[in-house]
Amino acid sequence: MRARLTVGFVLILIPFLFATTHLLMMSTMHSHTIRVQADVDVTGSRALAVLDDKDWMQKLDQIFHDPEVEGTGLGAIVVDRGDNILWRSESNAPRQVDPAAGQSLFTSGDRRIALKRPDPQRFQGSTSMLYSLNVITTIAFGLGAWILVAQTLTPIRALARQAREAGKVDLRVKLESPSRDPEMRELVSTLNDLIGRIADSADQKARFYAAASHELRTPLQALSGHLELAADHPRSVDEYRAAVGEALTQTRRLTSLVEGILLIHQLDGKSAVMQESACLSKTVDQVLQPLLPLIEARHLNLTSTVEPVEVSAIPAHLGVLVRNLIDNAARHGREGGILAVESSKGELRVTNDLTADHHLNVARLGEAFFREDASRSSNTGGNGLGLAICQAVATANGWCLGFEQHDDHFSARVVFGGL
């Protein structure tokens, strides 16, 4: 970056300096031409006025020895009709009359005065000096830019070293601004926010992996234990049937866990692109039918008032979301309480009753395998993935899912997009 910025600065500076020098020289030469022409006109008129005098040579010497005329750098010769030189100035006099050489001619009778303008070649030295000065200026400014860029990048390098050393110890670090510049402080604050979010995501994934390992280990141990007991000694048909039944139950639990984990992994951080129009009320009716035995077994008072609105979604995703929300409310709600499914103004709300002493950590309900009470979840057959799957589905489809608890009522609220 240091070399790129310096080279870029020099590449911008070079055409600017040389263009400025060229314009300056052009303006100077134009002004010089106008001034020389004025000097020629004045000096020629003075010389022409004395040509008819008897002592014209002495007077011409006086004119061209005048400091003002000498300062102009003009030289002159006086010739007759045959171009024979009758008089010439002591300095800068032309050798012969030659109008093509930039001379100005003034005629009086048989005599002509040829005035030679200053040689423009004398400006070449000034031009070369200016261009040399441009080269020196470019080099000086390039070195200055190199040093300035190095000083500007020093805090960034210090910040990079700080982040590199801190990251070796712990991902959750707090960087300190290496300078008091507002821009550097803003950069450090932004990086600290980013590091915090990355650390939170890493912690959440670590909790997910640990919980997933624990959840998978439990049915595997149970399955292994039942199969080992059944294989140790001869059993009756009923005992074998009971062992196989328990093994089947644990296998189904494993299957459910693996499918849930795979679904969360597939949805994590991805957006649904192949969305279709799905009817919300139809989806709710389809989901409720297989859940009615559970609702009746727990003596829940079901009310369903869902408007027949169209939702932009992957149809399977909408079914997964609605099924998990209603299943969670039916399993974890207070037995004999209410179970309300309702929709209005582009949102779906599923509400259930809770026991008086049941207080939920609503901020963590969307985390995979998070359960307020492991024994309660074991009794209800939950695995801690239902609401996490709902959260992943909502995120993938661009919906907003939130959880609320008011006294002994719990609600899951989904705001759909594209209604």
Image: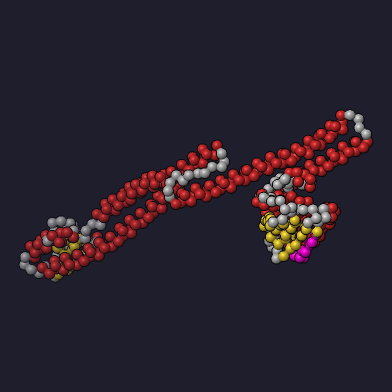
Q: Is residue 290 visible?
A: no
- Residue at the spot 24% in from the left edge and 54% down from the top edge: 122
Q: Position of residue 110 (x, y in %)?
A: 14, 68
What's the residue at 41%, 50% (across, down)?
Answer: 9
Work out whether residue 373 or residue 20 is closer to the camera in this orientation and state it.
Answer: 373
Q: Position of residue 413 (x, y in %)?
A: 70, 58
Q: How far across and how far down the image is residue 410, in percent?
A: 71, 56
Q: Residue furthest right?
A: 237
- Tell me: residue 319, above or below residue 37: above
Query: Which of the two residues, 32 or 248, is positioned nearer the viewer here?
Result: 248
Residue 183 in the magenta stretch? The answer is no
Q: Residue furthest left?
A: 54
Q: Nearer the viewer, residue 274 or 117?
A: 274
Q: Main secondary structure of the magenta part?
A: strand
Pick whichever, 387 or 168, lies toward us. 387
Quick check: 314 above or below 255?
below
Say if residue 300 shows up in the picture: yes
Give the residue at x 32% y 47%: 136
**Relative to residue 26, is residue 352 drawn left or right?**
right
Q: Give the total number of marks visible in the rendering.
A: 0
Q: Locate residue 21 relative to residue 94 in the image: left or right.
A: right
Quadrant of the image containing the C terminus: bottom right
Snapshot quadrant of residue 346: bottom right
Measured as percent of width and height from the top left, residue 327 is found at: 78, 53
Q: What's the colour scheme?
A: secondary structure
Q: Residue furthest top?
A: 233
| Above or below: residue 288 compared with residue 383 | below
Q: Tell me: 52 left or right of 309.
A: left
The residues colored magenta run: 302-313
**Residue occupying the point 77% across, 53% down:** 334
Instruction: Specify whether residue 308 is painted magenta.
Output: yes
